[in-house]
Each structure stands twice: as C-alpha cells, then as structure tokens.
Image: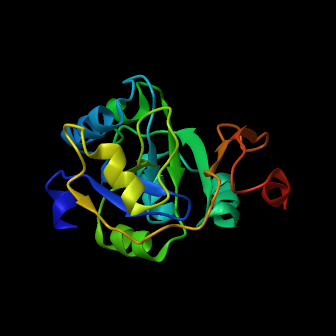
Amino acid sequence: ISLLKRGGVAVVPTDTVYGLIADATRIAAVRNIMRMKMRSRSKAFPLFVRDIPMARQYAVIDAKLWRMLERLWPGQTTVIVRKREAVPDIVTGGHRTVGLRVPDHPFLDKVLTAFPRPLIGTSANLSGSEPASSGIEVQKTFRRQVPRPDCLVDAGRLPPSPPSTVVDLLNPDRPQIIRMGAVTKEKFDE
C-alpha cells in the first residue's frame, strides 16, 4: 500500500492473469506503466475499484446501472461507462468513458480495501503479447524494461483463465459485449 501511495507500480496475481497495478490518479505512475508495456497513449487502461460506491465516485452510475453491476461484480467483467472528472484523461486515452472492474481475488480485495483510490489494472505484459500467468514469466518480460515494476507479488502459476469480458454499458438497456472472455454471454444474460 505504501508503494502504491508513493506512485510505485506492482505486479500482482488477479482472478485472470498477473496484472500491473498503480494509483490511477497519479499521472507519473500511469506514464510508467505505459512505458513498461510500450503502450500507445491513445489506448485506455481499465481500472480496478473496490466496490460499486467507489466506482460511482469515478463514473456515472444511476440506480439501474447499479442493479446491473450488483449482478456482475465482483468478477471477471469489465464494464465501459461514462467517466467523471476525477479520472485523468491519460487513463482513458482522452475518451469520455472508462473501463471498471471489481476483481474477485482475495489479495486484490485486501489491497483495494486498504487503498483509497482506483488502481490501473492491466495485464503484466508488453502491448500485443501474451499476458503472464506466472511470476517467472513476469520477470522475463520486464527484465530489460526501463522503467520496470517496483514489486512482484509472486503467487506461482495461476490457473488458466481467459481475460475479463468487456461490456459496453453506456446504454444499460442495450449492453454490448466488446470482448468475450471469462464471463459468457449466457451468464451475462441471466
């Protein structure tokens, strides 16, 4: 937590793959992740949030959307919603939307409970390459990168998992699946 508060970048296990996390409100930390991943400035980052009340501080969430999120979170679903001013433009690639997710992982749950702001939550890999599913893969990926992550929480090899499902909820009456992942359309329709 103190590393994140100082603007550091950590690699942690998630409910999908290893992820890079950092304080989403610290522009320098976001820039570091962009450089580590060799990621375009125009590409948005998803955010991990603790719960729906925290999500509401950073995105426009009405009562109908709240009820929908109660069914989807915590879990492997990233939702695209309208962002609030509190989300820096560098996080969203200049877009007026933001991707949010409440992960279902005990370690991340503890981090998000203790940390007062949303976290960048992106896969621990170079842009365009396969996400890491072990600490050894993370070390190999970033060993020559400058900058590189400040910390690795190594939980060994993670069970195989597809990425999170990404759903556009700008119009909650007509959700659109942008990327099929761990959560299937059938489960989403329940």
Query: In the image shown, does 89 or 126 lie closer to the viewer?
Result: 126
Query: In the image shown, does 112 or 180 lie closer to the viewer?
Result: 180
| Residue 20 appearing in the image | no
Query: In the image shown, does 36 or 190 lie closer to the viewer?
Result: 36
Q: How many marks?
A: 0
Residue 61, above or below 135: above
* Image quadrant where one finds the N terminus: bottom left
Q: Is residue 138 left or right of residue 168?
A: left
- How far across and how far down the image is residue 121, in percent? 42, 51
Report the residue at 69% width, 49% height from top.
181
| Residue 151 appearing in the image | yes
Residue 178 falls in image quadrant:
top right
Report the residue at 57% width, 41% height from top.
81
- How far across and how far down the image is residue 105, in percent? 50, 71
Residue 64 falls in image quadrant:
bottom right
Residue 108 falls in image quadrant:
bottom left
Q: Is residue 184 left or right of residue 148?
A: right
* Image quadrant where one finds the C terminus: bottom right
Residue 80, above or below 1: above
- How far across and how far down the image is residue 101, in percent? 53, 55
Q: Is residue 81 left or right of residue 188?
A: left
